[in-house]
Structure formats: C-alpha cells, structure tokens
Image (spheres, rainbow, N blue to C red):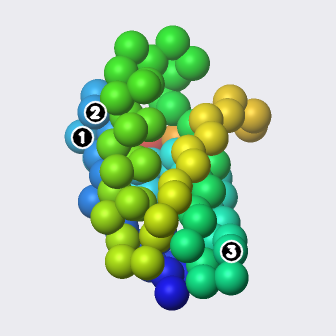
Amino acid sequence: MPTVDQVREALVEVQDPELNLSIMELGLVYDVAVEGEAAEHVIVTMTLTSPMCPVGPMFKKSVQDRVLAIEGVKTAQVDVTFTPPWDPKTMASDDVKVLLGIW
C-alpha cells in the first residue's frame, strides 16, 4: 500500500517546467492524501508558480503520471489551487531560496 511519504518522495522527481527545480523543494505541493481500503487513490493538492502558467495542464499531467507510476496506486487526482498564493520566500526550501537569490 502506498503511503503519503512514498508519494511525496516520488514527487521530488517532478520538476517545475519553467524553473527546472523540484516541485517539492519549491513548495508547490500543499497536500497529499492517500485514500481507499488499500490506499489505492491518491489526491495531490498543489499550486503553480503563476495562475497564468502556460504549461499548467501539461504540468498537472506530469504530476498525475508520476503518482500513477507508484506501485499500488490505481487512481490519482491532482487539484490545482491558488489559495494560498505560492510565495517562494515562505514555501520554498532553503536550498531553493539560495538558487533563486531569495535571502
């Protein structure tokens, strides 16, 4: 059965298409839920770096495909939200802040 930690680990491999940095390190993933008797349904709540992101649908599909590749996952739902708005100053990892020049 997949766990929330396994899903989060798998999502480290997904990179933001514009910044080429991990979506987990950027703080774009707000929540991961694993549901069902065998934990076969995963819901990822995430945001984009910009509401007008031109690659949003492709980016969302990349996240969904990565989750579906985890053994035991049968369905994956990716919900995009802009509440709260993404703020790299408070949501990104320290390493990403250094790379983005935020200090």
- Rendered position, 72 above or below 20: below
The mark found on residue 36 in the picture is 3
* Type of amino acid at the residue the image marks with label 3: Gly
The residue singled out by tag 2 in the image is: 17
Question: Which of the pair 45/88 is nearer the observer?
Answer: 45
The mark found on residue 67 in the picture is none
Residue occupying the point 29% across, 28% down:
18
Label 2: few (<14), some or many (≥20) within 10 Å?
some
SS of the residue at dot 1? loop
Question: Which of the pair 41/67 is nearer the observer?
Answer: 41
Q: What is the C-alpha distance between the residues marked 2 and 1?
A: 5 Å
Image spot of residue 64 (x, y percent): 42, 49
* Type of amino acid at the residue the image marks with label 1: Asn
In the image, 84: left or right of 94?
right
Q: What is the C-alpha distance between the residues marked 3 and 1?
A: 33 Å
In the image, 47: left or right of 59?
right
The residue singled out by tag 1 in the image is: 20
Q: Is residue 29 visible?
A: yes
